[in-house]
Image (tube, rainbow, N blue to C red):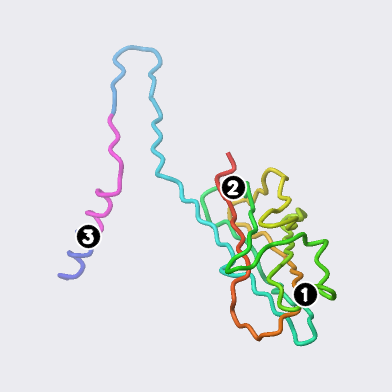
Amino acid sequence: MKKKVIATLLSLTLLFATSSPVSASEITAAGAGTTPVDLTVETQILRVTIPLSLPITMTEDGEVMVADNASITNHGAGPIKITDIEIKGANGWSTVDYNSLDNASATVGGKNVGFSLNLAATNILTTGANTDNFSSGAIVITKGQSLPLTYDAVLPAQKDEMVGVQVAEVIFTIGWND
């Protein structure tokens, strides 16, 4: 019995604490009355998941392999857009023209990487040192949707074994689709 009383009191407290007050106006003569509709909007959440890393593996034969499950997901309150993508070298590596780097004849141990990203049928290629060709304006991702991100890389053969060395970074600029 005591638990029921406490549960009922807690329910009533919750009901009154979460309800909005409504005031009334009286119409004292025949005619129309006007009731304003007031809107309160809490700050909208922009929450996007981007890949933590884009791994590249070079086999002992020089074959480059990349992940096939990368994506960008919009978990926010509305549609978002990717307005810029920048690809640049890291840790002494430089980005170079993706279409010009020939890993078969490049100097072994060179610290150059050509990079290609594909998002929503938009190809972004490195075109030189820390440059890319992203010029489509914006890539839109609707609320609750994921956009597959495919990528590729070309780089010269390496003479020393490396594990987990960051050779480049991709900077995504994301905002509301307003």
> Callout 1: 10 Å neighbours few (<14), some, many (20+)?
some
Mark 2 or mark 1: whose residue is earlier in sequence: 2
Task: Please name whichever residue, 76 or 65, is drawn nearer the observer in this view of the structure.
Answer: 65
Quadrant into which the C terminus falls: top right
User: What residue is shown at x 80% (from left), y 86% (from top)?
Assistant: 61
Query: What number is the disc on residue 10?
Result: 3
On screen, residue 41 versus residue 85, left or right, reads: left
Q: CA distance from mark 2 to mark 1?
A: 45 Å
Would you identify the image quadrant in which residue 146 lies?
bottom right
SS class, disc 3: helix
Circle on res. 107? 1
Q: Dot 2: what SS? A: loop
Residue annotated with mark 2: 79
Q: Earlier in the sequence, mark 2 or mark 3?
A: 3
Q: Nearer the viewer, residue 134 or 80?
A: 134
In front: label 1 or label 3? 1
Residue type at numbered disc 1: Thr
Which percent across, then down, holds residue 62?
78, 81
Q: Quote the CA–CA distance across marks 1 and 3.
A: 74 Å
Q: Which residues are drawn in magenta?
A: 10-23
Residue 72's label in the rendered image is none
Q: Position of residue 109 (x, y in %)?
A: 71, 78
Q: Nearer the viewer, residue 140 or 130?
A: 130
